Image (cartoon, rainbow, N blue to C red):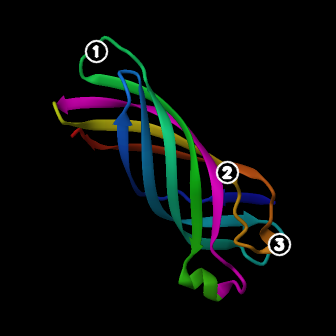
Amino acid sequence: MLYWLTKSGGFLVGYSYQLNSWAGAEGNYGYTQNTLNTLGSFRQPSIRSDFHEMTGAFVAHIPVSLERIRPYALAGAGALIFNPTDDARSMNAGIDRQAKATFVYGGGVNFGIVRNFGVRAEYRGLVYKAPDFKLENLNLDKVTHLAQPSVGFFFRF
């Protein structure tokens, strides 16, 4: 059986605290709407759901000699919540909301524009067990990976 998620856009907000010049911690919340597609002998070919991401990570700031450029790497853990939409619930009897633990890793670069504001380019990878929405015929018992490239803004207080 083949399993994949559709490509989609969403948002990610977070708070980062710098412990010292090279170490920090951050917490993030993300949201998107996605569709789980399966190809095989299952009655559910696709399930649309709201996708909530809550993660915490250790951040290692990599020292460089460029003044406004701050590369970093991150690693942590969190939870992903897959909440089927109303139309998915009406088409799939017994489908239910499901949470999965995740490992998050990644890295990126903060580009400072002015003292308290800049642009961030980041890649985050999420590793987690594939959701089955509590349906036995969708239980793959497989670990999967989700790639999240992003560009956004940061504010420093």
Mark before the other along the chain sequence, 1 or 2: 1
Give the residue displayed 42% in from the left and 20% down from the top: 62
Determine the secondary structure under disc 2. Answer: strand
Mark before the other along the chain sequence, 3 or 1: 1
Determine the secondary structure under disc 1. Answer: loop
Q: Extreme front residue here?
A: 19
Give the residue displayed 50% in from the left and 55% down from the top: 54
Q: Which residue is mark 3?
A: 137
| In-image side of 58 versus 35 (left or right) | left
Q: Distance of mark 1 from mark 2, alpha carbons? A: 36 Å
Q: Amino acid at mark 3?
A: Asn
Mark before the other along the chain sequence, 2 or 3: 2
Q: Distance of mark 2 from mark 3, alpha carbons? A: 19 Å
| In-image side of 37 versus 40 (left or right) | left
Q: Which residue is mark 2?
A: 128
Q: Nearer the viewer, residue 64 or 23?
A: 23
Residues in magenta? 91-114
Q: Extreme top residue here?
A: 65
Give the residue displayed 27% in from the left and 41% down from the top: 154
Q: Amino acid at mark 2?
A: Tyr
Closer to us: mark 2 or mark 3?
2
Q: Extreme left residue here?
A: 114
- Crowding at label 2, few (<14), some or many (≥20) Cα neighbours within 10 Å? some
